[in-house]
Amino acid sequence: MGKELRLFYPGEYTKLNYPNPFLRTGELGACRMDKSEKECYMRVDVPGIAEEEIRVWSESGFIYFYGKDTKLPHYNYDGRAFGGSISFNPQSYDSDGLKAEVKNGVLWLSMPRIKEE
């Protein structure tokens, strides 16, 4: 990934990329970053978080995200919160074009590359 993109992990378990013991196929990690000629894109697992419950913003070369699901007292469940930051090179990527959507418990982020002149 080089110096263009860097993901900051908030906790020790995510540093280990601790796998879900119930996952049968697919990527083991809770997040993935990749890039193409036109954009960079990121996938972050945020199970239980609806799109309207997550906030995504960009400032000073960072993308930030935070979301919290609702408490379910009947199940003695206080909810979970997810949040983190991703640094990017503002000379390489256009933060004004940042797009975010949540599909099936996954936060998908994409940001276009700045065309070299």
Image: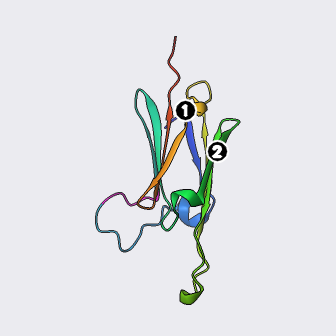
Asked whether, in this view, residue 72 is left or right of residue 40, the answer is: right
Report the magenta residues as a range. 26-30
Would you place residue 116 above or below residue 25 in this image?
above
Q: What residue occupies the far front of the structure in this picture?
A: 52
Report which quarter residue 72 is drawn in.
bottom right
Which mark identifies residue 108? none
Name the main secondary structure of what is drawn in magenta: loop
Q: 51 or 109, which lies in front?
A: 51
Q: Is residue 18 magenta?
A: no
The residue depicted at 38 percent of the width and 61 percent of the height is 28
Asked whether, in this view, residue 63 is left or right of residue 114, the answer is: right
Q: Position of residue 67 (x, y in %)?
A: 60, 60
Q: Amino acid at mark 1?
A: Gly
Q: Secondary structure at mark 1?
A: helix
Q: Which residue is under mark 2?
A: 57
Q: Amino acid at mark 2?
A: Trp
Q: Could you tell me if the residues under marks 2 and 1 are in contact, i.e. CB atoms within 8 Å?
A: no
Q: Which residue is under mark 1?
A: 97
Would you place residue 79 above or below residue 44 in this image?
below
